[in-house]
Image (cartoon, rainbow, N blue to C red):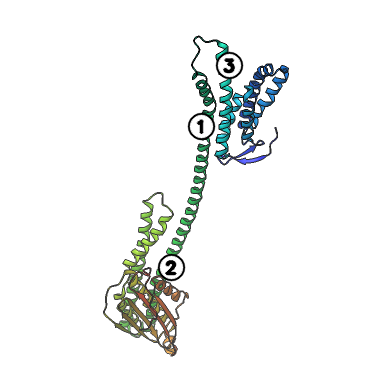
Amino acid sequence: MTTTGAHQDGTGTTARTWLWWGRRRSVALDVGLGLFSALECALEGVGFAEQAAVPVPIGVLFGLVVGSVLVLRRRWPIAVVLVSIAITPAEMGYLMGVVGLYTLAASEVPRRITALLAGMSLTATLIVTFVRVRQDVQSAGFDPEPGAWYVPTMAGFMSVGLTAPPVLFGLYIGARRRLMESLRERADSLEQELSLLADRAEQRAQWARTEERTRIAREMHDVVAHRVSLMVVHSAALQAVALKDPQKAVKNAALVGDMGRQALTELREMLGVLRAGDDEQRRVAPVPLAAVAAAAAAAAEAAAEDGPCIADVEDLVGQSRQAGMVVELAVQGEVRVYAPEVEQTAYRVVQEALTNVHKHAAGSKVMVRLAHRDAEVAMQVENGAPDAAGEAGVARLPSGGNGLVGMRERVLALGGVFVSGPTDSGGFRVSAVLPDRDPSDGQELPASVSL
């Protein structure tokens, strides 16, 4: 028998397609049933030939041909049932009738057609059985004769017994197949959804890792750039006065040491938070991808709680004054405590702005303003035009060009407003407004950053 193609079975493996059969086992089953049906009909064809007064070979040949139709039951179940109904008066094809009704009920044929053909088969079987039972009763010569109820009762039991079980069993098998197919499709759908969820979790984890790397880089920049900038400034001053004023040189050396220790302390605190997050992840095995985002958020929150606050701005200004910068600090409004991330962001904005003044406008005067308002805190750092004489006496500090970008990212992440740019007098101004609330609560953002 030739093959006509390939398909995938329920397990997803590729299987050969044999004509209208899906598997080789189905071919063997249907061919075997067809042979049994042909032999049955051939034997029953002998009696049919005697009753119809035709040669026996013709009756046997007719039975072989009609019985072999059962091979087509999967392809044309309606035709098989119609043939079985047609040969019922000849008292042939009982196996074909039973198997045909089962196949019809289990197939995707509309239920009204199944009910119609089952009713036709029941009627034909009832009529033939009624006639046969009555003939047997008359020829047997029972004494006493059975009642009038005997023949129809026996005919009814036999016809229902030959028709109802295969139809009901076929309906059950068909419903079970459809249920299994539905469950298989649902399982495939769930597998696809799980795959999509896994992809999204991986994307969220990648985003969390990127955000955490960005945050770490920003913290490292803020800590190192400011402290090291002041250390470089004091080192230049120390070199200039080492021989002329030893006492001032000792003072500058002590300031350099203090700033270095402060930078190391902040770095250790930052690395300690990161190590604590790593240790917590190692205690949970296996770690899901979605936990990376939670760990990053926890690390960010812990760093914010342990970081500097607005109250430390005064010390920050004092360090810049010790480095020779002329800095004025003005505070407006009632001082209060804000959320840890707001406190740290405000401190970092002022810190980075002062660092930029050390790098790019040495010797210029600086004005630092803090304004505590009803629902926000505003800060502004403005320096005048660079002093050429001051710049000549201070070592040129390198710049990575990421300071303003980092400040903007910090402020916008909290739902604030950030503005920076040159002033008309030749200086530079950095302004920011941070809301004292959750940026996701839907309130309107501040419209300006004026102080």
Q: What residue appears at the point 57 percent right and 35 percent down from the top-left corner? A: 116
82 to the left or right of 433: right
Mark nearer the viewer, 1 or 2: 1
Q: What residue appears at the point 51 percent right and 48 percent down from the top-left corner? A: 189
Q: Which mark, by number, is residue 18? A: none
The one nearer the camera, 156 or 100, is 156
Identify the image quadrant of the N terminus: top right
Q: Residue 40 at what x, y percent from top left? A: 63, 21
Q: Residue 141 at what x, y percent from top left? A: 55, 10
Residue bearing mark 3: 135
400 to the left or right of 89: left
Residue bearing mark 1: 168
Q: Is residue 213 above or below residue 399?
A: above
The one nearer the camera, 184 or 344, is 184
The part of the image, by quadrant, that contains residue 35 is: top right
Mark nearer the viewer, 2 or 3: 3
Residue 161 in view here: yes
Q: Is residue 191 above or below residue 114?
A: below
Residue 28 in view here: no
361 to the left or right of 336: right
Q: Earlier in the sequence, mark 1 or mark 3?
A: 3
81 to the left or right of 357: right
Q: Residue 326 at what x, y percent from top left? A: 35, 86
Q: Residue 73 at what x, y percent from top left? A: 62, 32
Looking at the image, the residue that sits furthest to the front is: 148
Residue type, mark 1 in image: Leu
Q: Is residue 201 above or below residue 89?
A: below
Q: Which mark, by number, is residue 217? A: 2
Callout 2: helix, strand or loop?
Answer: helix
